[in-house]
């Protein structure tokens, strides 16, 4: 049994007519008929019922058609994989990321990927999660590794990477600095330092306060982590930040927030129903937890 026999069989099963099937696979009709006879002899069953007017599948033929499709699809995937590997030396990987990605050491990951695939040109762009998602959709980025936007367009899919609780950050002399667990309700009336509206971290905090019907005054808006922590350290306001910020050197005190507290979900965002390049698939497989699988041609991982 050869792949060409399966291709000929699928063509006849689809057309239910030998002349059209022969044209479809670009062989003469006698060659196609001989191929089907060889396949039936190998299997020991009739795959078609033929008469002068019609061609129909037998019960065995219907069962075999499912498996023939599976084998041909697997062969196509294998051919594509080999082509991808051959082209990897000339590949470009375009990644978008936020300033911080919870649950993932992105510099270490990029270094590991570069060590394994030094010929791949890596392009990295940093920005807000919503903007990065749009650039993925427009094809300017292969993937975005960032906080998950509150709303994700239906033509994008998010592969979960990790969930990070948010912490209260305040100056050491602030009235809340000595507390280790704080209710969100206790923060009403405070001045806040935060990221611009539309950033995932800002949206998570805004929604948390809205759900509790608490007004919040954002006195300072910044677009970088260090700037935010410096303003907090100088007691110009408090901030609710991703838990990973606590590892950044700064003269800031942190406290946990009692549930319901805002959380950030981090994900790899890609275009839905579109096969990733081999370089992007390898990178995503390295980024995901061991229990997760990178997307395949015909399926996308579930988003949140």
Image (spheres, rainbow, N blue to C red):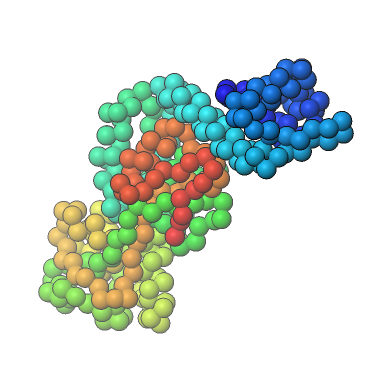
Closer-to-camera residue (191/187): 187
Placement of 133 over or under 140, stated as above or below:
below
**Quadrant assignment, res 90:** top left
Q: Nearer the viewer, residue 26 or 295?
A: 26
How many numbered discs? 0
**Is 27 drawn above or below residue 115 in the view shown?**
above
Q: Is residue 8 above or below residue 175?
A: above
Residue shown at 79% from the left, 32% from the top: 50
- At horizontal 87% and vertical 30% (from top left) the residue drawn is 52
Provide residue 17's location: percent of width, then percent of height: 80, 31
Question: Which residue corresponds to the image point at 49% horizontal and 51% vertical from the top-left?
Answer: 157
In which quadrant of the rendered image does the C terminus lie?
Answer: bottom left
284 and 164: which is toward the camera: 284
Q: Is residue 125 visible?
A: no
Q: Nearer the viewer, residue 88 or 54?
A: 54
Query: Residue at the location (41% across, 57% down)?
Result: 148
Determine whether, in the image, residue 52 is placed left or right of residue 154.
right
Using the rendered view, name the quadrant where residue 242 is placed: bottom left
Residue at the extreme right:
53
How far from the left and from the top, in percent, is residue 190? Answer: 28, 76
Above or below for 285 versus 101? above
Task: Please give left or right for residue 154 compared with residue 101 in the image.
Answer: right
Q: Quadrant of the N terminus?
A: top right
Residue 248 appears in the rendering: yes
Residue found at the very far front of the displayed protein = 44
Q: Tell me: 283 left or right of 60.
A: left
Instruction: Tell me where residue 238 appears, x and y as whole percent.
Output: 25, 69
- Tell me residue 255's x, y (percent): 19, 70
């Amino acid at each position: 049994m050869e792949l060409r026999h399966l291709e000929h069989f699928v063509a006849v099963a689809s057309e239910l007519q030998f002349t059209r099937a022969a044209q479809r696979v670009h062989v003469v009709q006698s060659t196609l008929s001989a191929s089907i006879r060889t396949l039936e002899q190998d299997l020991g069953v009739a795959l078609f019922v033929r008469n002068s007017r019609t061609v129909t599948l037998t019960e065995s033929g219907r069962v075999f058609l499912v498996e023939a499709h599976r084998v041909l699809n697997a062969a196509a995937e294998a051919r594509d994989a080999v082509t991808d590997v051959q082209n990897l030396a000339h590949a470009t990987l375009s990644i978008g990321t936020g300033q911080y990605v919870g649950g993932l050491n992105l510099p270490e990951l990029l270094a590991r990927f570069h060590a394994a695939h030094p010929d791949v040109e890596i392009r990295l762009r940093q920005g807000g999660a919503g903007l990065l998602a749009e650039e993925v959709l427009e094809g300017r980025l292969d993937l975005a590794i960032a906080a998950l936007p509150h709303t994700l367009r239906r033509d994008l899919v998010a592969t979960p990477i990790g969930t990070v609780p948010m912490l209260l950050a305040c100056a050491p002399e602030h009235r809340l600095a000595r507390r280790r667990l704080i209710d969100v309700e206790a923060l009403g009336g405070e001045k806040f330092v935060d990221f611009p509206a539309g950033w995932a971290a800002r949206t998570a905090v805004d929604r948390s306060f809205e759900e509790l019907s608490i007004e919040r005054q954002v006195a300072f808006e910044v677009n970088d982590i260090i700037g935010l922590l410096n303003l907090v350290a100088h007691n110009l306001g408090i901030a609710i930040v991703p838990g990973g910020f606590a590892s950044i050197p700064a003269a800031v005190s942190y406290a946990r927030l009692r549930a319901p507290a805002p959380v950030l979900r981090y994900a790899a965002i890609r275009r839905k129903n579109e096969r990733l390049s081999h370089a992007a698939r390898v990178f995503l497989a390295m980024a995901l937890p061991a229990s997760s699988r990178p997307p395949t041609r015909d399926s996308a991982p579930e988003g949140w």
